[in-house]
Amino acid sequence: MTLFERFRAWQDHRRWHRLACERALAEFALTHAERTVGAHVLRLGAQEAVVRVMYANGRIPLGRCWYAVPRDGGAVRELSFEDVALMESPWR
């Protein structure tokens, strides 16, 4: 793989990472009234990303929601903690 091909692959990875976070944050804004703190990708697959959205709920630790974001532009769906328990620690 040439340097240019590696650079393009890295760019594509970063673009997909950013898009997954943006789509999860947009979905959170549509369904919740809380203010978001940020988003973090837990798993970035070729076809789907799992994103954790943290929000300010007036408590420590922050509230969390998880979303499955498909790469093809399909509907973003909210996941339960049981769906992401192997990727997520309850103390994070």
Image: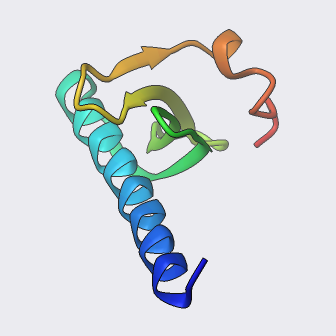
> Which residue does the image show at 39% across and 54% down from the upper left?
16
| Residue 46 higher or lower than 19, as above or below | above
Residue 40 location in percent, x, y?
A: 54, 51
Q: Is residue 58 left or right of residue 76?
A: right
> Which quadrant is home to the N terminus?
bottom right
Residue extending furthest toward the left: 30
Residue drawn at point x = 42 percent, y = 17 percent? 78
Residue 72 higher or lower than 75, as above or below: below
Residue 77 x/y as whole percent: 37, 17
> In this view of the protein, which residue sits in the foreground, 47 or 6?
6
Residue at (17%, 28%) from the top-left corner? Answer: 30
Q: Looking at the picture, does residue 5 appear above or below residue 28?
A: below
User: What is the tally of numbered marks visible in this picture?
Assistant: 0
Q: Hey, which residue is sitting farthest front in the picture?
A: 1
* Left/right of residue 71 with respect to residue 53 in the rendered view: left
Residue at the extreme bottom: 3
Q: Where is residue 26 shown, x and y percent of the image?
A: 22, 40
Instruction: Look at the image and tell me in which quarter the C terminus lies.
Output: top right
In terms of depth relative to the viewer, which is nearer, 68 or 54?
68
Name the residue rendered at 48%, 68% in the picture: 9
Name the spot of residue 84 as percent of width and height, x first.
68, 22
Q: Is residue 73 left or right of residue 57?
A: left
